[in-house]
Image: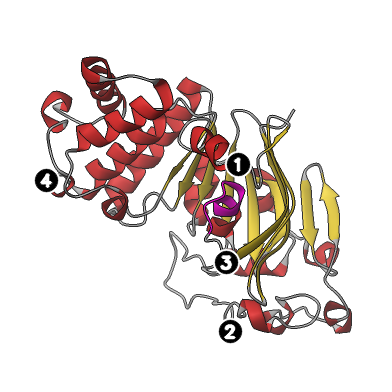
């Protein structure tokens, strides 16, 4: 049974569709990566699933957690679920932590809300979580303010806070964007280690295909509010099928060999309120044909767990 199952999830802000029928599932304990350019709908997918979008957003579809529908659930139920069974880490810890409260108090509040711990018991558990995520001198750090810690340490605080409710699913939304490369690697190693130790599932939202390949077991590629390709990591990197996926990989700089010009994808992601007819990627695609503009392409199954929404997917599916 899937831990989380999203079916037909659509989101619009006025006349602009942000998501156009998202279908994705997360199994217990697995790591799912979600990639795509900014504005493709990666973060909106999970904000919508957890009821975190503003009231003006129109949301439809289905989101189940262990078979129980949670989309449009009452606020009291969502408050227990968010930070408890499902936790989310955002990309900028400095905007997520309250600058006027000590970090130990902020983690203790999460422990009180989701596990009923108070006083010394909450403080002791906060210290244990700090040690678990590798914050040095945890006892003293409990009384520090966010500005007294580095960006990497604040991100570890956010991970500790996310773990406070013993979540079944951890959603990490670009958790290393504001960090330098060395600290990025440490945070990703930490997330992997915690996932294995605690048996929780992980959804990693990232622009970095290298991070996804090293961290995740399955990957979903998003473009203009749709999942255009989904596959096991090994299959996707060995034989990407959708021209957009191939374009993303071609834009990666080579690690060795002579320097060469990067193959950037021409153009940009279309505005949600001004999508082209048919395949939204067709105007930027070198393989586009008349059929691409005739209608929104359906998924084509290309192998075990590998699907692509493209009329030329079979033709494009050659080793990269």
User: Measured from the top left, where is residue 185 in percent x and y?
Assistant: 35, 44
Q: Residue at x 70, y 84 (%)?
A: 283
Query: Quarter of the image containing the C terminus?
Result: bottom right
Q: Look at the numbered disc 3 and give the secondary structure of its residue.
A: loop
Badge 3 is on which residue? 56
The residue closer to the viewer here, 32 or 231, is 32
Task: Choose the circle earlier in sequence order: 1 or 4.
Answer: 1
Residue 70: image quadrant is top right
Task: Choose the circle earlier in sequence order: 3 or 4.
Answer: 3
Badge 1 is on which residue? 74
Say whether residue 117 is left or right of residue 296.
left
Q: Residues within 10 Å of mark 1 (few under 14, many from 20)?
A: few
- Between the C-alphas of marks 3 and 4, the distance is 37 Å
The residue closer to the viewer here, 311 or 204, is 204
Badge 2 is on which residue? 267
What span is colored magenta in the figure? Answer: 46-53
Q: Residues within 10 Å of mark 2 (few under 14, many from 20)?
A: few
- Between the C-alphas of marks 1 and 4, the distance is 38 Å
Residue 148 badge:
4
């Amino acid at each position: 049974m899937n831990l989380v199952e999203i079916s037909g999830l659509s989101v619009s802000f006025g006349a602009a569709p942000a998501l156009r029928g998202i279908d994705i599932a997360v199994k217990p304990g697995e790591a799912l990566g979600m990639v795509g350019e900014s504005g493709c709908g990666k973060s909106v997918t999970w904000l919508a699933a957890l009821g975190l979008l503003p009231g003006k957003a129109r949301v439809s579809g289905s989101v189940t957690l262990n078979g129980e529908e949670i989309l449009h659930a009452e606020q009291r139920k969502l408050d227990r679920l968010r930070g408890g069974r499902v936790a989310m880490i955002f990309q900028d810890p400095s905007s997520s932590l309250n600058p006027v409260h000590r970090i130990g108090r902020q983690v203790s509040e999460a422990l009180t809300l989701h596990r009923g711990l108070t006083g010394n018991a909450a403080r002791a558990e906060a210290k244990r979580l700090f040690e678990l995520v590798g914050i040095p001198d945890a006892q003293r750090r409990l009384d520090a303010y966010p500005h007294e810690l580095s960006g990497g340490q604040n991100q570890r605080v956010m991970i500790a806070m996310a773990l406070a409710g013993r979540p079944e699913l951890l959603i990490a939304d670009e958790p290393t964007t504001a960090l330098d490369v060395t600290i990025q690697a440490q945070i990703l190693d930490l997330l992997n280690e915690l996932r294995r130790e605690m048996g929780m599932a992980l959804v990693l939202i990232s622009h970095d295909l290298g991070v996804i390949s090293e961290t995740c077991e399955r990957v979903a590629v998003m473009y203009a509010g749709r999942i255009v390709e989904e596959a096991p990591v090994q299959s996707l990197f060995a034989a990407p099928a959708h021209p957009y996926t191939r374009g993303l990989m071609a834009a990666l700089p080579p690690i060795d060999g002579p320097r060469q010009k990067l193959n950037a994808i021409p153009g940009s992601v279309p505005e949600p309120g001004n999508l082209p007819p048919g395949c939204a990627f067709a105007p930027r695609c070198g393989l586009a044909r008349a059929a691409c503009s005739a209608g929104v392409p359906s998924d084509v199954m290309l192998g075990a767990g590998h699907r692509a929404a493209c009329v030329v997917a079979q033709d494009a599916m050659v080793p990269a």
